[in-house]
Amino acid sequence: MGSLSEAVTQVLIPVCALVGISFALIQWFLVSKVRVSNDPGSNGYSDRLIEEAEAEEGVDSLEVTIKCAEIQHAISVGATSFLFTQYKYLSVFVGVFSAIIFLFLGSVKGFSTKSEPCTYNKGNLCKPALANALFTTIAFLLGAFTSTLSGFLGMKIATYANARTTLEARKGVGKAFIAAFRSGAVMGFLLAANGLLVLYVSINLFKLYYGDDWEGLYESITGYGLGGSSMALFGRVGGGIYTKAADVGADLVGKVERNIPEDDPRNPAVIADNVGDNVGDIAGMGSDLFGSYAESSCAALFVASISSFGIGHDYTAMSYPLIISSMGIVVCLITTIFATDLFEIKSVSEIEPSLKRQLLISTVLMTVGIAMVSFFALPSEFTLFNFGTEMTVKHWHIFFCVAIGLWAGLVIGYTTEYYTSNAYSPVRDVADSCRTGAATNVIFGLALGYKSVIIPIFAIAVSIYVSFSLAAMYGIAVSALGMLSTIATGLAIDAYGPISDNAGGIAEMAGMSHKIRETTDALDAAGNTTAAIGKGFAIGSAALVSLALFGAYVSRAGIKTVDVLTPKVFIGLIVGAMLPYWFSAMTMKSVGKAALKMVEEVRRQFNTIPGLMEGRAKPDYATCVKISTDASLREMIPPGALVMLTPLIAGTFFGVETLAGVLAGSLVSGVQVAISASNTGGAWDNAKKYIEAGVSEHAKSLGPKGSDAHKAAVIGDTVGDPLKDTSGPSLNILIKLMAVESLVFAPFFAAHGGLLFKFL
């Protein structure tokens, strides 16, 4: 037994989750700490910002501040209405899919209510299959709800903080950075703490029914991961199509054809573009990382439940994945204080190092935290289930598994940063290639993306080998948890990017001075790189999570070995490897179709509204917002259906071995495509920003805005947009979602799957 008692564990986990939520609320309070007028009928938004302008009198006119408040309000309303419409569609999907889960799992034993002999804990009786069907469905609904809530809260916080970041930029770069970073931290901590709390409460409530049947309890909890990821998929794809349709439309007509700045208020697509940053990068990313977190926890809990922890009912050791996440919240809290209170940023050049320092500090502190948790929560020696055999493991083995996942995450983060930041040669080479036009820019960018896959894949490979050697599938599951243990810091850094991007847009639209725009641009360029780091984390953790889920699926489906040389498995392998390409083709074409409509609409407005270019008339923002909304809601359904239906069709008609092949194939090819797509897009974006900023002599020789090299860079950025914000980040959900869905439906596939082969 570990030295932590069950009672201490029961208190420790919810307390850490509540500390995380409280810390998020404190950060939110600090962001909103501006004097509010005493007028009881005030509408809150504009009044607070106007009060702040008066406090800062003489810096900028009151009119500018009122404009900031108006723009912020428009963005907030646009994002909220889009998400509500999206959730209406998704509630229908959740209802239908819940019914499918219940019917498929209930039919495993013909809806009988008799207790069954346990699958792993031989000689004991477990709860009936019908109970598992019901509780898996409830867990699915809880996961879907928590994922939706995570995305929605993140979006609300981001739209609340963007204008505040703009106004803080008048006081200097340090103040603006703190406003944006604190707002990101609110999202990071709320998400990590909510995910942990809901999972902890669900397990304890399910236990009231399951009692000693831990095998059934943790099998039904896997539905939580499925719910989280299925919402994330639609959030990521829908949000990604929305934001990129607006962005591509705004860039191609505004920058390339009309030669006006990026966020110029004359551009009709500009509000849609700013709304898109929030629904795609914030709400989508929030749901995505929550899905990863939920699945890695569920995979680790399920694998542990069929080992000596579950059979021996060692509650503290069983809750090890949750204790790791609790420790992560505490570590990230300390790390955040470094960024906001201990080190003050005085110049633009300090922004990116400060964000990178966050990653390093949290990783170092977390390594110490993992060591403490491993030695106190785990018995010094125990056995794990390893595909039908028992494997003896020591607690320090598990420490190494989690730690290597954590450090592999840091390696992936730093590699991503090297390939996507304009501080290093890869992006500068891409910028340099713009001198000879868009074609060379595209060639260099693609080469950079493919090359950037090498180091992350080796990092993932090493962590898989070490974890699997030390602790079988449980080792891989906790390694994925290690990578996600600092999720609160990772998300804070990630959400900081779109908030800064919006702040820059608001500064431009409100007509603020060039100096403020330079400050917000610098924040945004650093945010672009950190967003790429966030995506790197999401993809790396998705690879480990889906491998752990794959192992759990193979155990649950009763497959002894997955033999690539059998035709059943090989056809699955080759089809699985094709799926990421099919999925990317769907999402990219969707962005292309929506962007086409957007370009036509923006052109139409410039050509038909008299006085629009001169700034005498206002553009029709609402039509552009509607084009993005309609396109994303319509186009998110086919890619979503492809991912959700593939495991069901493969398992039901071709059986468990073919499905194992499909999962392995999609994992192996999906990770490569996802990393290269994200990094190519990030590099093109920052190459364009490098030319626009014109900080070095080299950059000045390529610029200024409107030069041929700049136009070539804008085209590269436009090609990269759907790669980095729609296809790339959605692919990691494809890999995880298919694996967790297969695990949830494994009892059904094992009992009734392979219909085609039964008839042949």
Image (tube, helix red, strand yellow):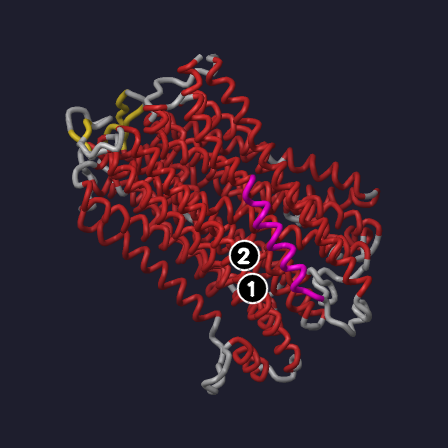
| Residue furthest to the bottom | 39
Q: Is residue 637 magenta?
A: yes
Q: Nearer the viewer, residue 292 or 489?
A: 292
The residue that mark 1 highlights is 177
* Residue 456 shown left or right of residue 143 in the figure: right
Q: Looking at the image, how many numbered discs can be counted on the residues?
A: 2
Tell me which amino acid carries mark 1: Phe
Tell me which amino acid carries mark 2: Ser
Q: Is residue 246 magenta?
A: no
Quarter of the figure with residue 162: bottom right
Crowdedness of circle 1 by 10 Å Cα count: few (<14), some, many (20+)? many
Nearest to N terminus: mark 2 or mark 1? 1
Q: Which residues are magenta?
A: 620-638
Q: Quadrant of the C terminus?
A: top left
Asked if residue 244 can be seen in this view, the reply is yes
Give the number of the disc on residue 655: none
Crowdedness of circle 2 by 10 Å Cα count: few (<14), some, many (20+)? some
The residue that mark 2 highlights is 354
Q: Residue at x 28, y 38 (%)?
A: 218
Q: Residue at x 44, y 23 (%)?
A: 653
Q: Are marks 2 and 1 in contact (CB under 8 Å)?
A: yes
Quarter of the figure with residue 16: bottom left
Asked if residue 327 can be seen in this view, the reply is no
Percent position (x, y) of residue 25? Answer: 40, 66
Q: Secondary structure at mark 1?
A: helix
